[in-house]
Image (tube, grey):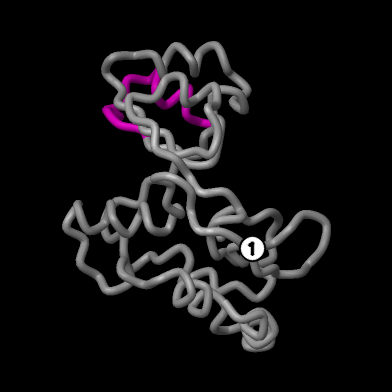
């Protein structure tokens, strides 16, 4: 859901997805497009977690980013389906599921539809969906809000709660 292209929410409940109630206090956000200047500015960033993105190849400042990723002072965790350029710099590499292995609801490029992604097979090897990884991480970090325990179907239904017509059509597909 957080991969939204364009300004419209297309029936997705944005406040639920962004969950401002789960991040009180400082609300720092950083795009991977701004990562190089931030790392080079000497801000105290000691750990980096990336998932489903190859920042070492997609940054407009690739050489500088690769130098920053190689730094001993930065602990980098990469969650991806493939051994990407970014994964080459990972201190810890975790396997991600493919689209065939997890439930998701998403927008697509080029039209205004919301689509259901239904799993075709169980996750292979030790891969888990991003949502499960984040549930486990939240538990280990001591976050106890019930939202951190919601399963994927609950997350999808909540995200679509104001788009009842969307929810009815998507859930007719039998999540």
The answer to whether 105 is drawn above or below residue 158 in the figure is above
Q: Is residue 46 left or right of residue 114?
A: left
Q: Give the image location of residue 39, x and y in percent.
A: 39, 23
Residue at the image point whose x is 55% and y is 26% from the top: 84
The one nearer the camera, 101 or 77, is 101
Q: Quadrant of the C terminus?
A: bottom right
The one nearer the camera, 42 or 121, is 121
The one nearer the camera, 93 or 24, is 93
Magenta region includes residue 33: no
Q: Quadrant of the N terminus?
A: bottom right
Q: Give the image location of residue 163, x and y in percent.
A: 63, 83
Magenta region includes residue 46: yes
Residue at the image point whose x is 69% and y is 71% from the top: 10
Residue that mark 1 sits on? 106
Q: Is residue 93 left or right of residue 158?
A: left
Magenta-drawn segment: 34-48
Q: Quadrant of residue 41?
A: top left
Q: Give the image location of residue 129, x and y in percent.
A: 46, 54
Q: Give the image location of residue 26, x and y in percent.
A: 29, 51
Q: Is residue 32 left or right of residue 20?
A: right
């Amino acid at each position: 859901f957080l991969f939204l292209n364009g300004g419209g929410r297309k029936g997705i409940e944005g406040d639920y997805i962004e969950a401002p109630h789960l991040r009180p206090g400082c609300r720092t956000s950083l795009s991977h497009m701004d990562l190089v200047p931030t790392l080079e500015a000497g801000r105290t960033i000691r750990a980096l977690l990336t998932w489903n993105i190859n920042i070492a190849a997609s940054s407009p400042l690739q050489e500088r980013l690769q130098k920053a990723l190689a730094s001993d002072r930065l602990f980098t965790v990469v969650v991806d389906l493939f051994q990407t350029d970014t994964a080459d710099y990972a201190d810890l590499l975790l396997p991600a599921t493919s689209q065939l292995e997890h439930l998701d609801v998403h927008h697509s490029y080029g039209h205004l539809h919301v689509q259901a992604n239904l799993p075709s097979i169980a996750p292979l090897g030790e891969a888990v969906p991003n949502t499960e990884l984040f549930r486990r991480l939240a538990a280990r970090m001591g976050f106890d809000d019930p939202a951190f325990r919601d399963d994927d179907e609950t997350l999808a239904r909540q995200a679509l709660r104001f788009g009842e017509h969307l929810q009815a059509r998507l859930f007719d597909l039998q999540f």
